[in-house]
């Protein structure tokens, strides 16, 4: 695209101008179509930018209320719901899932603790490929949770992390529903987004919001990249196939109204960058979780190579930790969650920082998209220069 013609709107506090420069460079140099980035420091919005277009036809600029489906950035929001219940003493993350969801005890899963759901260690990273799942079936909450309750572990529970790419939201979300007595969409709206005035929902609750949604565009792939991806899927073992390809989704699937309306708490959160930053800011300032609850959420479950993705990981309970990759800044205990194609939300309580990033031109990576990393690096350059 001709990124030079993209107009950037918004403000940066004095000293944070390099973030705007990085944001503008994403359009010129890294293929950005439309995007927004917000950063909060010690409760003050220091960066609030948006630019480009909400669809590939470039008919409408990205506005302050443009919603983007953020794919797995939603998982962090789902984890917050579970931690709210744990903070209130209603959910014990070390208790068996079956204490709250008795049907989950089937097929030898009776002793799997909630902690292993939150940290992708349950051994159930997907529905086994002997039971093919259609995309439309993902919209049926009761069907998906019943399939997961009946599913045998695909590897020994607790032995390794294996990214629960699609099913994380139903696993954790059903526990939230059983404990809270209401669906996770409603719980999140009442307990997280609503009190903060954050424009974020797990699936669209109102058709009136459809017109506010950005149109997602699939990644631009070279022939070499496409061939490598096809080879990877062809050679994937049954665990990875269950987690990533049953069903196999593409970025543009999120543009379908039925996809947008469904409750899929791993996949289809819709929100603004400012909303994501606001929610993570509510973790930093203690509005959403007590200090002990936040410490539990950030508790490292160990560094390892993910059994599904084959990537080095360090999970907390529901969040990536910054770890060696420093995906959320230089603080290795900063945390957050990226979404397929580039979106992110994260927090660094030690530095009082929270941020959110939304976009519609998806990149090919599951996490640490170069555009995101450029923004985070610029943000911390500013923070460190203010300390100098």
Image: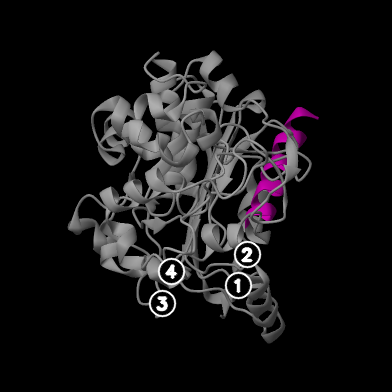
Q: Which residue is mark 3?
A: 58
Residue 86: x and y in percent read 43, 20
- Where the C terminus falls, by quadrant? top right
Mark 4 → mark 2, Cα distance in angstroms: 17 Å
Residue 2: x and y in percent read 57, 80
- Element class at badge 1: loop
254 in relation to 218, above or below: above
Name the chief secondary structure element in magenta.
helix
- Asked whether residue 73 is drawn in magenta, I would say no
Mark 2 → mark 3, Cα distance in angstroms: 17 Å
Q: Residues within 10 Å of mark 4 (few under 14, many from 20)?
A: many
Q: Residue furthest front?
A: 107
Q: Which residue is mark 4?
A: 216
User: What range of the chain is rendered magenta?
Assistant: 372-388
Q: Residues within 10 Å of mark 2 (few under 14, many from 20)?
A: many
Of label 3 and label 4, which has the lower sequence position?
3
244 in relation to 290, above or below: below
Of label 2 and label 3, which has the lower sequence position?
2
At 71% from the left and 56% from the top, the residue drawn is 310
At 64% from the left and 48% from the top, the residue drawn is 17
Mark 3 → mark 4, Cα distance in angstroms: 13 Å
- Element class at badge 4: loop
Q: Which residue is mark 1?
A: 31
At 51% from the left and 66% from the top, the residue drawn is 245
Left or right of 326 in this view: 23:
left
At 28% from the left and 26% from the top, the residue drawn is 180
């Amino acid at each position: 695209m001709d990124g030079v013609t993209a107009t950037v709107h918004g403000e940066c506090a004095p000293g944070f101008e390099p973030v705007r420069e990085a944001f503008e460079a994403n359009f010129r140099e890294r293929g950005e179509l439309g995007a927004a980035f917000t950063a909060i420091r010690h409760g003050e919005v220091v960066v609030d930018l948006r630019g480009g277009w909400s669809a590939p036809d470039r008919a409408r600029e990205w506005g302050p209320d443009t919603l983007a489906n953020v794919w797995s950035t939603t998982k962090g929001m789902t984890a917050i719901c579970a931690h709210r219940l744990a903070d209130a003493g209603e959910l014990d993350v070390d208790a068996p899932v079956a204490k709250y969801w008795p049907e989950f005890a089937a097929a030898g899963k009776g002793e799997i603790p909630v902690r292993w759901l939150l940290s992708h260690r349950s051994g159930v990273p997907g529905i086994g490929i002997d039971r093919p799942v259609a995309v439309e079936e993902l919209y049926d909450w009761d069907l998906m949770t019943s399939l997961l309750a009946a599913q045998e572990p695909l590897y020994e529970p607790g032995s390794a992390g294996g990214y629960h790419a699609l099913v994380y939201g139903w696993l954790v979300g059903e526990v939230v529903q059983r404990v809270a007595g209401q669906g996770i969409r409603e719980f999140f709206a009442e307990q997280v987004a609503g009190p903060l005035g954050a424009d974020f929902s797990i699936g669209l609750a109102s058709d009136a919001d459809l017109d506010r949604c950005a149109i997602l565009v699939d990644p631009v792939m070279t022939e070499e990249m496409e061939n490598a991806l096809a080879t990877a899927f062809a050679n994937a073992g049954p665990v990875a196939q269950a987690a990533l390809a049953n069903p196999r989704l593409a970025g543009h699937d999120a543009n379908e109204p039925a996809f947008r309306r469904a409750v899929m708490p791993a996949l289809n959160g819709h929100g603004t960058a400012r909303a994501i930053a606001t929610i993570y800011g509510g973790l930093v300032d203690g509005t959403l979780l007590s200090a002990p609850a936040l410490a539990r959420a950030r508790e490292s479950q160990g560094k390892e190579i993910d059994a599904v993705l084959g990537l080095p990981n360090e999970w907390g309970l529901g969040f990536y930790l910054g770890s060696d990759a420093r995906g959320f800044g230089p603080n290795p205990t900063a945390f957050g969650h990226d979404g397929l194609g580039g979106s992110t939300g994260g927090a660094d309580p030690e530095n009082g920082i929270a941020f959110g990033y939304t976009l519609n031109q998806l990149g090919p990576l599951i996490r640490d998209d170069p555009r995101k990393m450029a923004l985070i690096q610029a943000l911390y350059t500013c923070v460190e220069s203010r300390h100098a």
